[in-house]
Structures are given as structure tokens and as C-alpha cells.
């Protein structure tokens, strides 16, 4: 009987020790998960499901939703890089390139040439035995061409012509560009990037012009890709338009056949308010479907909603073809705009995706 009791005690102790190890293991696994959860909350300061972002960062803010980027969210984006593959998301531009019809033409003019420098001899330092000279160009160019990110001052609305955070044309407009929420206020961007290949999900090379991309279209594509959007992601929607860009986008007629496909207002709201997108972009010149759906109060309701109401920057003419070909649906997105005061977009950019 004594031996049986000793045996049962030993067995009980073994069970208790085993259970303790199991409990410790659970705690060890749970603790880092809690840390991740806390860091995500920190990275998403300001976002609320069902509301999105908005004018929440103070009455002098010019950055919008990108305020939510943190060192942890940057690390989360960088952790997606496994192979070191680099994708160039920029398109080449010249004076003949296709652009949205509301923007001015551009000219790239040779300002100094070697022949001119030597012939004019208007600088004493340029007269030299080695025959050294240089090239430089003067640019007359619109600030909304080629690969771009719209500043929060790009779109105005209302009788007072206000933009994000209540800045108005009367107070902050000017002859040399806008003076609040211009492109120079867009911070360097390092985010988790998500590609939603809507064209592929519909079995098309490219969506026909005027196709409205709905929330259902986005959900179906994401399900086929087995990818989920996390709050704080930069989301890029592929229509397939830029497969017709060629070297510099000179086939205006062909590009225009597809360029007007894009997301509708419901999709913009779904991405921001339900999924927490911090930046929304595409491979077209204007992101949203054109013409605006019947019943819209403006010709660009998605721009008005994202830029003015939500403070969410818009990426346009991002080259997504290589990402789509490689089925690279999650990546580290890196972009930095030119710091030219007064401009309304970062333009002729060369953002990259890393994976």
C-alpha cells in the first residue's frame, strides 16, 4: 500500500512538472505576441475601424495618416525582405509622355551644352586646357506627371477652396505654390506594401477603361492571392494599364483606353475605414474610376475623400507589372518625394519594392 502511495505521488509530481513546463511554454509564446500587439497599436495611433483617419493630428498638421509610421512599423516592413529582390516602381517620362488631361505639358530644355559653354565663354573658369565643359537642363514640367504621390494640398473643395485640415486658398495659396501640406511635407516612406491584382483576378490583361473596382472585386482578388491587408499597409491596385506604357508612354491613344479604370468611393472607404490603409495607389494616372459614378458630388470623389477628408496620400502611375508577374503580393515599399516647396505632388519618382 505504501509503495502504491509513493508511486501515485511520483506520478502526480511528474504530471505537475509536465503541466508547469507546458504553462511556461504558453507564457513564453504569449508574451511576444502581446508585444507585437502593443507595437501594432502604437504604429496605428489615430486609426479607428469604421472611421479611418481624418483631421486628428492637430490643427497645424500637414502629414496626415503617415504620422502613424513608427520605428516598429518600419521594421515590420523591412522584415518582409527575404530574397533581396528589387522592383523599380517608377516609369520613364519625357516631353511626349501621356499625362492626365488636366495637367500642363512639359519641356526639358538644354540650358548649357559643351558646345555652348566653349563658344560663349561667359564664365572665366570654363576656359581651360583640358576642354572640360558640362550639360545642364532647364525644366518646365508639371508637378503631377509620371510616377507620383499626391500631397494633401493637391485637392481643394467647397466654396472656400479648403484642403486637408482646413487650410484654405485665401490663407495658404500663393503665386509660387501652396504653403501648407505641399509635397515637401511628405516624409520618407517605408511601409508594408500590398498588391491587389484585380486585372488578373478577372482573367484580363488589363481592365477596360471606365471599369469601377468595387470592394467585392478587392476582396475576391485578395482571397485568390491568399493575402490579407493589415492596418497601416500601403495598398496598390493593379489595373494592367502600364503594360502599354512602353519606354516613355508615347502611345496616348492606347494608354487612354485603359487609364480610366479605377476604384470607386466605396472601395476607398473600405480600404481606409475597414482595412486601415495608410496610403492607396495604383498603376493609372488618377487611381479612381472616370467618369465619376452617377450621383457623385464632384468629378474626383475618391481624391476628395482620401486627400481632404482622411489625410491619406495617393500614389499614381506606379509600375506594378513585375510584381504581378512574380506574384509578389507583399513587399517592403520605399519612397521619398522631391523636397520642392510649394509643389502639390512628388513627381517623376522612382519608388521601389523589396522582397
Image (cartoon, rainbow, N blue to C red):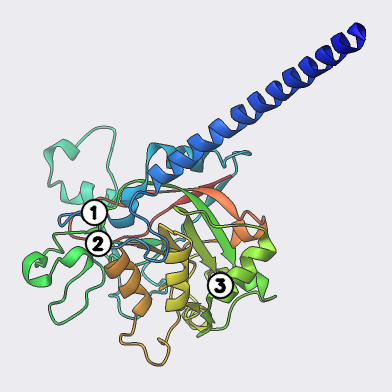
Residue 263 in picture, x, y percent from top left? 48, 75
Which residue bears the numbered disc 3? 239
**121 to 264, vertically: above or below:** above
Q: Quadrant of the C terminus?
A: top right
- The answer to whether marks 1 and 2 mark residues whose Cβ atoms lie closer than 8 Å is yes
Q: Give the Cα separation between the discs numbered 3 and 1.
A: 33 Å
Q: Is residue 9 left or right of residue 62?
A: right
Q: Is residue 185 left or right of residue 22?
A: left
- Residue projecting furthest to the left: 171
Describe the element under mark 2 as helix, strand or loop: loop
Residue 139 in picture, x, y percent from top left? 26, 61
Residue under the image location 34 percent in, 46 percent down: 188
Q: Quadrant of the N terminus?
A: top right
Residue under the image location 50 percent in, 43 percent down: 77
Q: Give the Cα separation between the discs numbered 1 and 2.
A: 6 Å
Residue under the image location 11 percent in, 71 percent down: 169
- Residue projecting furthest to the top: 2
Residue 353 in picture, x, y percent from top left? 52, 49
Question: Quick one: label 3 or label 1, which is nearer the N terminus?
Answer: 1
Q: Is residue 84 left or right of residue 117?
A: right
Dot label at residue 57: 1
Which residue bears the numbered disc 2? 55
Amino acid at each position: 500500500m505504501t509503495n502504491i502511495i509513493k508511486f501515485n505521488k511520483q506520478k502526480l509530481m511528474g504530471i505537475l512538472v509536465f503541466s508547469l513546463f507546458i504553462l511556461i511554454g504558453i507564457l513564453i509564446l504569449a508574451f511576444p505576441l502581446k508585444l507585437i500587439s502593443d507595437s501594432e497599436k502604437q504604429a496605428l495611433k489615430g486609426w479607428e475601424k469604421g472611421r479611418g483617419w481624418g483631421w486628428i493630428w492637430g490643427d497645424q498638421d500637414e502629414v496626415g495618416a503617415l504620422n502613424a509610421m513608427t520605428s516598429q512599423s518600419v521594421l515590420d516592413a523591412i522584415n518582409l525582405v527575404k530574397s533581396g529582390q528589387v522592383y523599380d516602381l517608377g516609369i520613364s517620362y519625357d516631353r511626349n509622355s501621356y499625362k492626365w488631361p488636366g495637367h500642363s505639358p512639359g519641356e526639358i530644355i538644354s540650358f548649357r551644352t559643351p558646345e555652348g559653354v566653349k563658344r560663349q565663354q561667359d564664365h572665366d573658369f570654363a576656359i581651360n586646357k583640358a576642354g572640360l565643359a558640362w550639360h545642364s537642363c532647364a525644366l518646365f514640367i508639371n508637378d503631377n506627371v509620371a510616377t507620383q504621390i499626391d500631397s494633401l494640398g493637391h485637392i481643394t473643395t467647397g466654396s472656400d477652396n479648403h484642403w486637408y485640415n482646413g487650410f484654405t486658398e485665401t490663407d495658404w495659396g500663393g503665386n509660387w505654390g501652396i504653403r501648407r501640406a505641399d509635397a515637401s511635407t511628405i516624409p520618407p516612406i517605408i511601409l508594408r506594401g500590398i498588391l491587389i491584382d484585380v486585372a488578373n483576378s478577372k482573367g484580363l490583361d488589363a481592365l477596360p477603361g471606365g471599369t469601377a473596382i468595387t470592394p467585392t472585386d478587392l476582396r475576391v482578388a485578395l482571397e485568390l492571392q491568399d493575402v490579407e491587408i493589415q492596418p497601416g499597409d500601403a495598398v496598390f491596385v493593379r489595373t494592367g494599364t502600364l503594360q502599354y506604357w512602353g519606354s516613355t508612354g508615347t502611345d496616348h491613344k492606347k494608354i487612354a483606353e485603359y487609364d480610366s479604370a479605377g476604384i470607386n468611393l466605396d472601395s476607398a472607404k473600405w480600404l481606409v475605414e475597414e482595412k486601415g490603409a495608410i496610403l492607396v495607389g495604383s498603376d493609372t494616372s488618377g487611381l479612381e474610376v472616370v467618369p465619376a459614378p452617377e450621383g457623385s458630388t464632384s468629378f474626383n470623389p475618391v481624391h476628395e475623400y482620401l486627400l481632404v477628408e482622411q489625410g491619406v496620400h495617393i500614389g499614381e502611375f506606379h509600375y506594378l507589372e513585375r510584381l504581378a508577374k512574380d506574384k509578389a503580393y507583399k513587399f517592403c515599399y520605399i519612397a521619398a518625394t522631391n523636397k520642392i516647396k510649394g509643389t502639390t505632388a512628388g513627381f517623376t519618382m522612382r519608388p521601389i519594392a523589396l522582397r
